[in-house]
Image (spheres, helix red, strand yellow):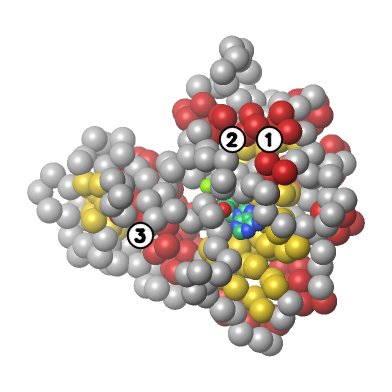
Amino acid sequence: MSERHLYPFPVSVNEAVEYLHNGNVVAMPTETVYGLAGLARNDDAVLKIFETKGRPRFNPLIVHCADMDMAQKVAQFNPLALKIAEKFWPGPLTLVLPKKADANISDLVTAGLDTVAIRLPEHSIARKILQTLGHPVAAPSANPSGKLSPTMSQHVIDAFEQKVPVVDGGACEAGVESTILAVEGEQVTLLRPGSVTAEMVKHAIGASVAYPTGSKIVAPGMLKSHYAPNASVRLNAREPNIGEAFLGFGELQGEGDNCRNLSSTGDLAEAAKNLFQYLRELDGTGAATIAVAPIPNEGIGIAINDRLTRAAADRTS
Ligand code: TXA
Ligand code: MG
C-alpha cells in the first residue's frame, strides 16, 4: 500500500468534500456510527475503502445520498420502498433495492450484485458533506474489518493512526449501525436489526417483515463473528467471575474500574448508544473476558443482542 501522510484533526466539511472529490477517503459522523466515505462512482476511492478497512471484497458497501433525487438515480424504488423511505428517511435505515442500470456506481460497491444498499443519513454533518459534494458516497463503518464500530471520532483516529482525515461530530446518537431492509416486490426482509425496529416498519407499512431464511437474500457482511473486542465475551451473565470485566444493564451493576453499566435506568436507546464505547473501555482494562448482563430482546435490544452475539461468537470457525 502506498505511503500516506498524517492528517490534522479534525478536518472541516469543506476539506472533507475536497478530499472526496479528489478520490480520497474521509471518516464522517452519521447518526449511527462513523463511516469511512469515498466517492461511490470512483473505483480507486472505493478500493481505498476496502484496503483501509482490510475488508473482503465480496462484502458490499452502503451508498449514502443527500436526498431522494440522488437516491432515485442509483436505485429503483417501487411504491412500497417509497413508502418506507418517506417514513424513515433521513434516518438510521438502509434499503436494499434493485440497482439502476445507469446508476454510475463502481461495481466494487455492490460486489457485483444487481441490488444496492442505500441510505439517507440524518446527521447534519453527513448531510452537509453529501449536499456540497453533490454525489453519493460509499461508506462502511470506519473500523478495521471485524472490529468494534466507531461511535466517536477518537475511535477512528485510534484505529487508523491519523492515516484517514476525520470530520468530528461528537458521539453518535444511535450507536448501532443502521437497520437493513431488503425490499423485493411486496416482500420486506430484515437483514440487520437496528434502531428502526421491525415493529416500527410493520406499523408504518401495515404489512409483515420477514426474516432471512438462510438461502435467500442475506447481507454478505453479516458474518457470524463480527464487532469483536480483543477480550472474549460471555453473555447473559448476572455477575462477573473473578478477573472478568463486567458490562451491566439496569440493576445488574458490578463494582469497580472494570465495570460499566449500559443504562442504569434500563433504557435500551441509551444502552445502544453506549454499547461500542463501553466494550472498548472494558477491552482496555486488559481483562481476558467481558461478561455481559442480559439485555431484554425487544425494541432496540434486538439490535444490541445481535451485535453482542457476534462479538461473543467463536472466532476460529
Ligand atoms: O449505520 C450504518 O449502516 C453505517 C453507517 C456508516 O452508515 N454503515 C455500515 O456499513 O454499517 P457496513 O459496511 O459496516 O455494513 C453494511 C452492510 C454489510 O453487512 C453488507 O453486507 C450489507 O450492508 N450490504 C451492502 N450491500 C448489500 C446488498 N446489495 N445486499 C445485501 N446486503 C448488502
Ligand atoms: Mg461494519
Q: Residue at x 56, y 79 (%)?
A: 210
Label 2 sits on residue: 50
**Which residue type does callout 3 highlight?**
Thr
Q: Quadrant of residue 191?
A: bottom right
Residue 113 appears left or right of 41: left
In the image, residue 298 sits, relative to residue 38, either above or below, namely: below
Point out residue 153 in the picture as x, y percentages from the top left corner.
56, 35
Point out residue 6 in the picture as x, y percentages from the top left corner.
59, 15
Mark 3 beta carbon near ligand 1 (under 8 Å): no
Q: Quadrant of residue 138?
A: top right
Mark 3 vs 1: CB contact within 8 A:
no
In the image, residue 81 sits, relative to residue 115, either above or below, namely: below
Q: Residue at x 86, y 59 (%)?
A: 72
Under circle 1, the secondary element is helix
**Which residue type does callout 1 highlight?**
Val
Point out residue 33 in the picture as x, y percentages from the top left corner.
57, 47
Residue 133 visible in the picture? yes
Under circle 2, the secondary element is helix
Residue 308 appears left or right of 293: right
**Which residue type does callout 2 highlight?**
Phe
Label 1 sits on residue: 46
> Which residue of the protein is positioned furthest toward the bottom in this rendering?
206
Point out residue 205 in the picture as x, y percentages from the top left corner.
71, 82
Mark 2 vs 1: CB contact within 8 A:
yes
Label 3 sits on residue: 309
